[in-house]
Image: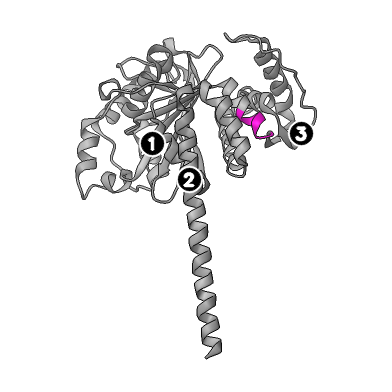
């Protein structure tokens, strides 16, 4: 009898402990949400109108069909465009789509190579990073949705000074630097400090990287690392570097104390432009501990490079339609996705242009 009572008391203690842990997690989440809301006035907010971004009617119809594979897989995912802008804040040096599975908290990141030859959303064809320069985030989102059969309706833009601040506040990030990357990394540090590319000179102290291997890079070093594009792999390797740094930021942020997170928020929010509301941002902040980056990739998956007339040296999808199928499989675990008529028409146009330019 005594043994049975002890087991019951032990079970109740475990239940109370689990409940207490759950309450603490909820409390921390609520504090994080409130914290973000109070500081939201520092953010450059930009509400998107549906008329400003492209919604493919054929895609919407698919999503509304209960038995459609697209409906079953895209439902429950939040897709956000992440833009990293250069010193002049005109062209996007980094274009990344973040897809969040709302149920599992898993995040997948896919870079769209900045030199990818695409329809800019206005039936002109050029490099993907031109869209932001021509029409800001609205045009860039329109381009992504039109070419990739996506339903992106929010974005976050951060300039590279914001990236530096985050990394410095976190105490740096762990990166495995290759020997061939060192001279370019140090050269980019110099260009950032001197304000080349349209920015203002920063006057920061340059600490050269001298040896290869796994090491902690500070904000300036890691930002310079993100911009390297002249080693083997060119822009494809650069986007891998950018995603690696983002993953390291996510890992360190999850393990940071409230004081560090407060410093990050104070430093970075003024350098952020977004269409998201304070409530949305607060929701994701409160769930930060449960969110995990589980996979990364680069689009187009199958590609060639060559001179595409006025667009110049470009990355060209080796069959855009097939690449879009692979993208939906990557993000949504969706087998047999059938691209919309719009994507097929764009794919044919790119194929014809490629043939005309001999690429």
Q: Nearer the viewer, residue 46 or 142?
A: 46
Q: Quadrant of residue 121?
A: top left
Q: Are marks 1 and 3 in contact (CB under 8 Å)?
A: no
The answer to whether 76 appears left or right of 214 in the picture is left
Label located before the other in sequence (1 or 3): 1
Query: What numbered label is drawn on residue 212?
Result: 3
Place of residue 354 in the rendered image (x, y in percent of width and height, measured from the top left): 39, 21
Q: Label 2: which residue? A: 29
Tell me the residue at 34%/30% (across/down): 153
Q: Nearer the viewer, mark 1 or mark 2?
A: 2
Where is residue 163 drawn, in percent x and y? 59, 26
| Magenta stretch encompasses residue 225 | no
Tags 1 and 2 in contact by the CB under 8 Å rule?
no
Q: CA distance from mark 3 to mark 2?
A: 40 Å
**Height in image: 273 above or below 27?**
above
Q: Which residue is labeled 1 in the image?
A: 79
Instruction: Report the side of 230 relative to 62 (left or right).
Output: right
Task: Give the structural element (helix, strand or loop) at label 3.
Answer: loop
Q: Position of residue 35 (x, y in %)?
A: 49, 35
Q: CA distance from mark 1 to mark 2?
A: 22 Å
């Amino acid at each position: 009898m005594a043994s049975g009572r002890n087991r019951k008391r032990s079970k109740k203690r475990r239940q109370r402990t689990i409940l207490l842990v759950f309450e603490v997690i909820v409390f921390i989440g609520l504090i994080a949400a409130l914290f973000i809301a109070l500081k939201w006035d520092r953010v450059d907010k930009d509400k998107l109108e549906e008329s400003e971004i492209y919604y493919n009617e054929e895609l919407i119809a698919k999503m509304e069909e209960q038995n459609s594979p697209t409906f079953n897989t895209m439902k429950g995912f939040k897709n956000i465009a992440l833009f990293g802008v250069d010193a002049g804040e005109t062209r996007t040096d980094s274009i990344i789509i973040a897809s969040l599975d709302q149920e599992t908290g898993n995040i997948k990141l896919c870079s769209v190579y900045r030199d990818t030859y695409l329809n800019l959303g206005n039936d002109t064809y050029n490099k993907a990073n031109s869209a932001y320069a021509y029409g800001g985030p609205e045009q860039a989102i329109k381009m992504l949705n039109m070419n990739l059969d996506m339903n992106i309706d929010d974005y976050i833009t951060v300039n590279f000074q914001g990236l530096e601040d985050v990394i410095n506040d976190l105490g740096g990030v762990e990166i495995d630097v290759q020997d061939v990357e060192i001279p370019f990394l140090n050269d980019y540090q110099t260009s950032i400090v001197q304000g080349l590319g349209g920015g203002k000179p920063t006057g920061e102290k340059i600490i050269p990287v001298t040896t290869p291997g796994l090491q902690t890079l500070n904000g300036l070093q890691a930002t310079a690392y993100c911009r390297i594009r002249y080693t083997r792999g060119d822009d494809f390797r650069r986007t891998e570097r950018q995603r690696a740094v983002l993953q390291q930021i996510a890992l360190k942020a999850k393990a940071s104390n409230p004081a560090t997170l407060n410093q990050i928020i104070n430093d970075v929010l003024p350098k952020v432009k977004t269409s998201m509301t304070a409530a949305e941002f607060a929701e994701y902040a409160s769930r930060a501990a449960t969110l995990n980056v589980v996979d990364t990739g680069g689009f187009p998956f199958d590609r060639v490079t060559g001179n595409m007339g006025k667009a110049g040296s470009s990355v060209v999808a080796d069959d855009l339609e097939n690449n879009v199928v692979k993208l939906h499989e990557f993000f949504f675990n969706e087998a047999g996705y059938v691209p919309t008529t719009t994507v097929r028409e764009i794919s044919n146009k790119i194929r014809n242009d490629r043939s005309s330019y001999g690429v």
